[in-house]
Image: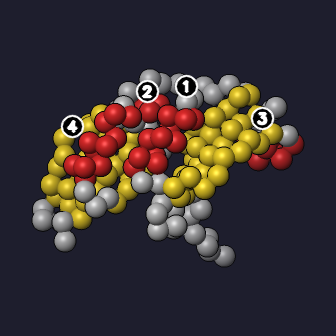
């Protein structure tokens, strides 16, 4: 038995509107927004009394999705600071291919984006950088030079 595909990446956020604005500015399209609660949500997450707002966004090609979750109950917890470094164990970034990296960074700055380090050139293949966004989420950006 093999997996069919990767369905989505989930990120817990505190400010849903800011996170949606950030990722739509990046070029993702909002698929929907709803709230979940009740026995199925409790069983699926292993938490009690789940009440969660969910927003689903998809990439323009329709192949990848990002699920943003804002927990009303139980409250979201943070074990580290939003400016945690890139080498923390666990999910550390989401990477997107972009057509113009410098323009993308410029559009994200008004949404609080901060480049970690600097834009780097990998041989004659890619421009790459990591950008910290809302809630400390690190987004990788890659522009193909070919």
Per the model, the C-alpha gap separating discs 2 and 1 is 9 Å
Residue, x 55% and y 35% (percent of image)? 17
Q: Earlier in the sequence, mark 2 or mark 3?
A: 3
Label disc, if present, on residue 78 of the rendered structure: 1
Among all residues in the image, which is located at the extreme right?
39
Q: Is residue 25 placed above or below 112 in the rendered structure?
A: below
Per the model, the C-alpha gap separating discs 3 and 1 is 17 Å
Examine the rendering and report whether any part of residue 61 can be seen.
yes
Examine the rendering and report whether any part of residue 13 can be seen.
no
The N terminus: image quadrant = bottom right
When asked about the image quadrant of residue 70, the answer is: top right
Q: Secondary structure at mark 4?
A: strand
Q: Is residue 20 left or right of residue 95?
A: right
Per the model, the C-alpha gap separating discs 4 and 1 is 24 Å
Residue, x 38% and y 56% (percent of image)? 96
- Name the residue nearer the viewer: 21 or 11: 21
Residue, disc 3: 50
Residue, disc 4: 117
* Neighbour tally class for label 1: few under 14, some 14-19, many 20 plus, Cα within 10 Å: few
The C terminus: image quadrant = bottom left
Image location (x, y in percent) of residue 130: 30, 44
Residue, x 57% and y 35% (percent of image)? 16
Per the model, the C-alpha gap separating discs 2 and 3 is 24 Å
Q: Earlier in the sequence, mark 4 or mark 1?
A: 1
Contact flag, marks 4 and 3 (Cβ < 8 Å): no
Residue, x 12% and y 62% (percent of image)? 123
Label disc, if present, on residue 82 of the rendered structure: 2
Image location (x, y in percent) of residue 138: 39, 40
């Amino acid at each position: 038995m093999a997996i069919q595909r990767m369905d989505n990446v989930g990120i817990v956020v505190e400010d849903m509107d800011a996170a949606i604005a950030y990722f739509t500015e990046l070029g993702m399209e909002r698929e929907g927004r709803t709230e979940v609660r009740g026995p199925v949500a409790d069983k699926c997450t292993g938490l009690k009394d789940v009440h969660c707002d969910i927003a689903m966004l998809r990439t323009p090609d329709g192949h990848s999705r990002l699920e943003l979750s804002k927990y009303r109950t139980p409250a979201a917890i943070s074990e580290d600071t939003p400016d945690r470094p890139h080498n923390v164990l666990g999910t550390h970034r989401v990477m997107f291919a972009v057509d113009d990296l410098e323009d993308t960074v410029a559009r994200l700055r008004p949404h609080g984006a901060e480049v970690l380090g600097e834009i780097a050139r990998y041989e004659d293949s890619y421009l790459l950088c990591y950008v910290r966004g809302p809630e400390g989420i690190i987004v990788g950006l890659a522009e193909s030079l070919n």
